[in-house]
Amino acid sequence: MYTLKKSLGQHFLRDENIVAKIIATLRQHPFTQLLEIGPGGGALTRHLVEIPGIIFKAVELDEEKVSYLEAFLPVLKGKIIHDSILDISTPFSGRFTVIGNFPYNISSQILFKILEWKADVDTVIGMFQKEVAQRVAAKHGNKTYGILSVLIQAYFDVEYLFEVHEQCFNPPPKVKSAVIRLTPRPVPLHLNNETFFFTLVKTAFNQRRKMLRNAVRNLFDDTMLKNPIFDKRAEQLSVADFVDLSNSENKSQEK
């Protein structure tokens, strides 16, 4: 057996109905390479390794869980990356799908990691704390709409699939959970300067209560700041609005 480590945010899925629902969702999109993040006790893993015709890898930081999984599922030997998901390089050559009951204490950081891999990621099926899932899926005008919403939705379509009760986990977390799916936008948004886009979004929402003109004043010249869009607050701008602003003439591009 194994111990559960609170420091690693370990809440392992134990409800077989939810497991089956997640696996069914995963198989709605074809894939040939699959990465599981945080296999833990193997609730999902034991089904994933049975999917025929795919290359499977898992990334797990906890040495005890690695040993357990390799004993529980010998087929996993050589397929587990014993490291933090935040520290590894791209796990495959070519496109791949990501799945996981993500550790809630680093779930936002995992999403930023997926953004680093966005050119190679086909689909993400992820279990998140409900509030994080809602934030990722939120549309503009919603109070939960923020940095994660814009940056993820600039590259992926987000589907808020279903919620999962606390008692479906061991131990039960103190928060509700939800599963979302990310799939690449069928028509990618064009960004002239991705670094500036990220800076713009983060700067705008770091002072989200301010009028946009005041929040991002240092990023645009005075002529550009006369545009009426700067009369709005960050949460009122759509993803497309942020992309258009990023692609406008700005000090970063002029240098």
Image (cartoon, grey):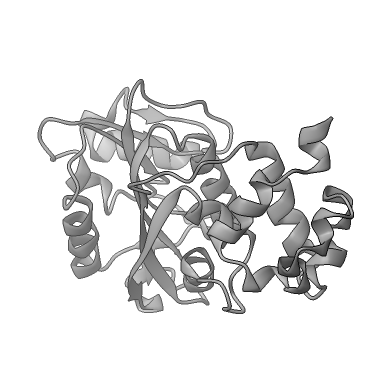
Placement of 26 over or under 165, stated as above or below: above
Q: Residue at x 65, y 72 (%)?
A: 235
Question: Is 234 left or right of 126, judged from the image as shown?
Answer: right
Q: Residue at x 48, y 36 (%)?
A: 63
Percent x, y for residue 204? 75, 61
Question: Is 234 left or right of 189, judged from the image as shown?
Answer: right
| Front residue (pair 154, 220) | 220
Percent x, y for residue 186? 33, 47
Residue furthest to the left in view is: 52
Percent x, y for residue 102? 45, 54
**Splitting the image into 4 quarters, where does residue 107 fall?**
bottom right
| Front residue (pair 65, 161) | 161
Q: Residue at x 54, y 68 (%)?
A: 135
Can residue 163 be seen here? Answer: yes
Placement of 36 over or under 5, stated as above or below: above
Question: Is 120 left or right of 233, judged from the image as shown?
Answer: left
